[in-house]
Image: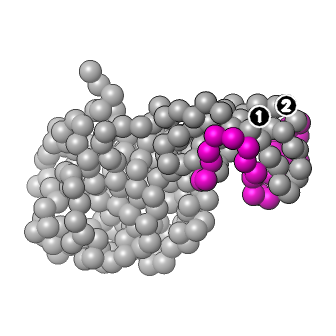
Amino acid sequence: MNVFYLPDAQIGTISFPEEESKHIVKVLRMKEGDGFCVTDGNGSLYDAELIDAHPKRAMANLSNQRAGYDIRDFKVSIAIAPTKLNERTEWFLEKATEIGIDEVKLFSSYHSERRVANVERFKKIVVSAMKQSVKSKMPLVEEMVSFDKLVKQNYDGQKFIAWIDDDVKDQLCDLYKKGENALVLIGPEGDFSKEEVALAKENGFVPVSLGEARLRTETAAVVACHTIQLINQMK
């Protein structure tokens, strides 16, 4: 199923911006009368029929507005220190969007190898993954902040910090409570410093393990996201 993103989608006749129009007409070679799906990124999907195959301003009729299958009562948030290689962070964003994530918080910490992030590029990765996996909601990708600022932000839900340490025995899968919002902090390649963990604990974060395997930053973030989603799908 071909899916296109239109944030201001609504029932009736709509037009697509040039980038999406080009993809519809030039890349996919769709013709008038062809059907496809539209997501508004805010929780709704629509059936669409192409009525004007113009490569710069394609138009379609939208009908059958419906809630996406990814609508849920809990929120999954992952805070991650972007990796030195951008493509590894982009991989995480793609896979987490496919699995199901609501927001990504970016931060820099003591051991960070990257202290700036191309958030606009990251958002494009998320949009592409949202369309590929037929999601109705687009994850929020926040601007990068310092670790200190991040842990002091208000968050309505359970808060965890994934930390590799011999004293951390509790597993995320054992402590997370099904149906509740969850925020998991994932550190950089050099992990968190003990001072950062102490500060996180002072602000309500619980240290957890993601298992015995030593995971890279982007893998750990995907594992945390999938763990929460899997627990919520269990009966």
Q: Give percent across and percent down for residue 18.
A: 79, 59
Residue position marked by numbered label 2 in the rendering: 33
Q: What range is drawn magenta here?
A: 7-31
**Mark sitting on residue 49:** 1
In space, the residues marked 2 and 1 are separated at their CA atoms by: 6 Å
Q: Does the magenta stretch include residue 184?
A: no
Q: Is mark 1 on a helix, strand or loop?
A: strand
Q: Give percent across and percent down for residue 56.
A: 85, 57
Q: Earlier in the sequence, mark 2 or mark 1?
A: 2
Q: Which residue is painted at 40% across and 50% down in the image?
A: 102
Image position of 20 (left or right of 196):
right
Image position of 56 (left or right of 218):
right
Q: Which amino acid, mark 2? A: Gly
Q: Say whether marks 2 and 1 touch (CB < 8 Å).
A: yes
- Say if 157 sits above or below 39 in the image: below
Q: Give percent across and percent down for residue 52.
A: 87, 43
Q: Where does the C terminus fall, quadrant-wise?
A: top left
